[in-house]
Amino acid sequence: MSAQDSPLLDVAIVGSGFSGLCMAIKLKEAGIHNIRILEKATEVGGTWRENTYPGAACDVQSHLYSYSFAGKADWSHVFSGWEEIQNYILDCATRYRLKDHIQFNTTVTGAQFSEQDGCWLIATEGGEPVRARCLVLGTGPLHVPAIPAIPGLENFTGEVFHSSRWNHDYDLSGKTIASIGTGGSAIQYVPEVAKQAAKLHVFQRTPAWVMPRNERAYTRLEKVLFRKVPLSRKAYRSMLYWINESRVTLMLNPRIARLMEGMARLHLRFKVKDPVTRQKLTPDYTIGCKRILISNQYYPAFNRDNVELVTDGIQAIRENSIVTADGRERPVDAIILGTGFVADPCQYMKHFPITGLNGQRLLDTWKDGAEAYLGMSVSGFPNLFQMVGPNTGLGHNSMIFMIEAQSRYIVDAIQHLKARGAGYMDIRADVQRDFNTGLQKKLVGTVWQTGCQSWYKRADGKNFTLWPGTTFRYQWATRKINTANYTWKEKVDINTKTPTKAAVTEY
């Protein structure tokens, strides 16, 4: 079947994680049912389908890391593990009857906008092309594993796997394990691996600031109260939101952030016995410049006799060992890569070409760094919306809040498109430019720009990831679209190739 013969959808959504499902739910609530979710896997879930490593859990409270419109009264813990979150996502997909809209085992390989037809032509791997008036990217920024370029890694004869591709068939018991990386995933699986392995070498390039975690199970009484008095659950969720939101002041003011370092140092001092190890685990950058991690189990793992913290750089990997810069060789049976994900859209989207008006490619547009209007719209790419796009990430609160705000905004945009009978809408280049100029100015002076290197930024220092403000300011900015910020083009009848309106509507 050719692209022109494919049925025309109102909206195609790529990905069925929290973003893609929220988008579909809000579209259906708005009466837009001619939609399809394109999912590469055999099940929904996104991040929480992929990350099943031992100890995997969310670092945002369960009652906040869930949809505001789909509360769950019986979360088992303040911070839930991956399995409970994945079950919640599966339940939402069933509750809102989304499975009928999902096309599984469908990997999107590219998309091209047809100005003549006013729709997106979406290519899939080994499948039929998909046509849609609007295209929503709900893939999220953290789904492509970052594999370090270490000489000899490809020659290692033992077991190698990334934390997001955990090999549950590999028995760690009695083995000598090397863990490379000390980010958000590693601090969760390291304590679990340490309990099983005969020896665990943790290779650290840069230490992270780690804060204690309010880790506890909810009582039966709390669950009953949340179920029978929904208002109590909503009040509790609101309390959690404002507690987290207050932390934005630390992110925006490095002087205030440094006051928090005292707490983190005390946590480290009380949890790690050896002073030499404590010193190696102490960061030399302002807290918050890199992602702040929370754990009660990570630091105590280094008190175990079978755990070694290695801070010398890795020089090479041999067939059965790792050699560090000091010349020491450590034999290992397996290597676990806790090296995070490729966060830069210019990298993780390089195998997913998106072509807009006049043949321009999205990655060429982003050659100086990814940017968008409100993180969603890019000039020259009509009817395209990206969820959790450039500069909408958070360092202090739940991304679900941002996802819901974006879903509402996109629905509003699509409703305007339909009400006008327009073929497509395109964010004005000057509006996008002014928005991003202002956004980068707001990032100046924040804790993220205090000198450290992090996945939040490009090598040239441009922060393409984080939102430099409160979440309620973002909600206000996305409460409804400003139609004057967009160019609106007349709709073309795809069969006759003639305009269906008398004039082009532009602002």
Image: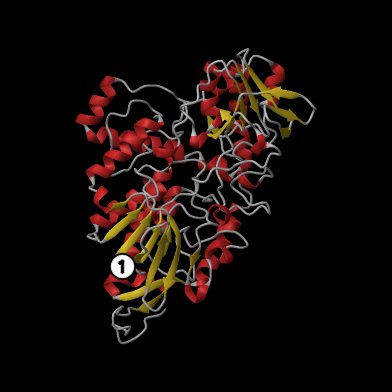
Query: In terms of depth relative to the viewer, which is nearer, 92 or 132?
Result: 132
Q: What crowding class fits label 1: few (fewer than 14 Cα within 10 Å), some (14-19), or many (20 or more)?
A: some
In percent of width and height, residue 145 lies at 54, 43
Q: Residue at (36%, 51%) from the top-left corner?
A: 20
Please state if 358 lies on the left or on the right of 270 as rendered. left
Query: In terms of depth relative to the viewer, which is nearer, 484 or 275?
Result: 275
In percent of width and height, residue 257 lies at 60, 37
Please state if 96 lies on the left or on the right of 293 as rendered. left
Q: Is residue 228 above or below residue 217?
A: below
Q: How many numbered circles are shown?
A: 1
Q: Which residue is mark 1?
A: 6
Q: Quadrant of residue 198?
A: top right
In percent of width and height, residue 344 lies at 57, 52
Question: In the image, what residue type sits under mark 1?
Answer: Ser
Instruction: Specify how the rendered protein is coloured.
Output: secondary structure
Q: Is residue 491 above or below residue 36?
A: below
Label 1: state its secondary structure.
loop
Q: Residue at (28%, 80%) from the top-left corner?
A: 495
Q: Quadrant of residue 500?
A: bottom left
Q: Quadrant of residue 442?
A: bottom right
Query: In terms of depth relative to the viewer, which is nearer, 396 or 392?
Result: 392
Residue 297 visible somewhere in the drawing: no
In percent of width and height, residue 218 lies at 33, 23
Please state if 213 lies on the left or on the right of 68 as rendered. right
Residue 282 visible somewhere in the drawing: yes
